[in-house]
């Protein structure tokens, strides 16, 4: 079974993904893949340097993430800059996700030949931008889970945990799909403004039937 997990920036998606993993799901982290595909000598990095110029790289040849973030997300950024960046990175990210999923399947099949036949394989694709790329992503999902928290909470979390200014937090939100668009593609909502314990229990309840387990 393939699950899409999404949520606006700083809603609590990674926290939910970590719990899904503890529950027994296999998680593909698209933010982590996005970092992999721009590592030194990776083809996406070379293409970014061609498209955005040498200022996109630090002196040591790594991606200058803060420079690029300003150039694609700031209020005065070229309105097509983010599109250009996504067009470079997303195909590499999808290919890497396909490969990781194939690997999970191979491991599952080896394991299913042994003692653990009753276990279901649940692969969670943790994709911040799922609502934005829903029509182009090369995967079909059996369920889509959205993690929600109100905008004020998310801005506060970004300022506290990502050292962003309020304007940077608002700019990032402005470049993502709305709550309504995320709801429109989802069949399951998780409220991440409820206390942490209650939220994690909600995750366990959602995952139990998908993993083929009894709920308590
Ligand atoms: C622009 C970059 C260099 C900024 O890096 P930075 O370290 O500031 O942010 P990081 O990558 O940790 O992402 C943090 C969050 O920003 C948001 N975000 C990232 N990329 C995008 C994007 N293309 N559009 C809208 N929001 C985005 C997501 O909510 C993500 O969880 C980086 O985000 C990037 O390369 N983005 C393009 C790839 C992408 O789409 N990544 C999202 C996973 S599909
Ligand atoms: N229910 C909750 N109650 C209190 N704090 C929470 C809750 N859920 C998440 N958080 C906190 O909110 C912050 C952001 O959560 P998390 O990193 O999971 O969000 P995210 O959506 O993955 O963010 P990003 O999009 O930046 O990767 C973290 O500090 C996390 O501990």
Image: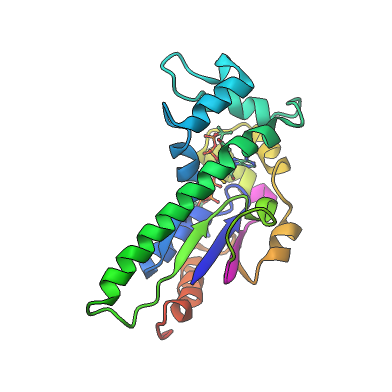
Instruction: Locate the C terminus and report the quarter of the image it occupies.
Output: bottom left
**Residue 205 percent location from the top left of the image:** 48, 77
| Residue 125 higher or lower than 63, as above or below | below
Placement of 108 over or under 56, stated as above or below: below
Q: Quadrant of ligand 1?
A: top right
x then y, percent, for residue 199: 51, 67
Q: Nearer the viewer, residue 30 or 104?
A: 104
Residue 49 can be seen, yes or no? yes
Can you give x and y, in whole percent of width and height, for residue 130 in the image?
63, 54
Quadrant hosting residue 77: top right
- Residue 133 vs residue 144, the one in the foreground: 133
Point 69% across, 59% down: residue: 182
33 left or right, relative to 176: left
Seen in the picture, residue 121 relative to 15 is either above or below; the reply is below
Q: Does residue 111 appear to the left or right of 94 in the view shown?
A: left
Q: Quadrant of residue 106?
A: bottom left
Residue 57 lies in the magenta stretch: no
**Res 66 visible:** no
> Looking at the image, which is closer to me, 169 or 98?
98
At 56% from the left and 38% from the top, the residue drawn is 89
Looking at the image, residue 63 lies above or below residue 199: above
Give how far across and how far down residue 188 sits, in percent.
61, 71
The residue at 32%/71% (across/down) is 109
Question: Which image quadrant is residue 148 in?
Answer: bottom right
Near-viewer residue (43 or 119):
43
The residue range painted magenta reads: 141-153
């Amino acid at each position: 079974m393939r699950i899409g997990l999404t949520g606006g920036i700083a809603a609590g998606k990674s926290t939910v993904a970590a719990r899904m993993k503890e529950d027994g799901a296999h998680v593909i982290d698209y933010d982590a893949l996005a970092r992999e595909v721009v590592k030194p000598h990776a083809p996406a990095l070379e293409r970014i340097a061609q498209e955005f110029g040498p200022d996109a790289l630090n002196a040591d040849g790594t991606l200058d993430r803060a420079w690029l973030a300003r150039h694609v997300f700031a209020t005065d950024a070229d309105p097509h800059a983010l599109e250009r960046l996504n067009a470079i990175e997303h195909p590499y990210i999808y290919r890497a996700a396909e490969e990781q999923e194939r690997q999970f399947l191979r491991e599952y099949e080896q394991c299913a030949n042994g003692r653990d036949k009753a276990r279901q394989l649940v692969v969670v694709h943790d994709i911040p931008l799922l609502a934005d790329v829903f029509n182009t992503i090369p995967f079909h999902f059996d369920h889509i889970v959205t993690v929600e928290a109100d905008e004020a909470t998310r801005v506060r979390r970004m300022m506290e945990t990502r050292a962003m200014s309020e304007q940077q937090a608002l700019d990032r939100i402005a470049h993502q799909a709305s709550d309504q668009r995320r709801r429109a593609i989802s069949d399951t909502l998780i409220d991440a403004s409820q206390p942490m314990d209650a939220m994690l229990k909600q995750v366990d309840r959602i995952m139990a039937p998908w993993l083929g387990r009894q709920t308590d």
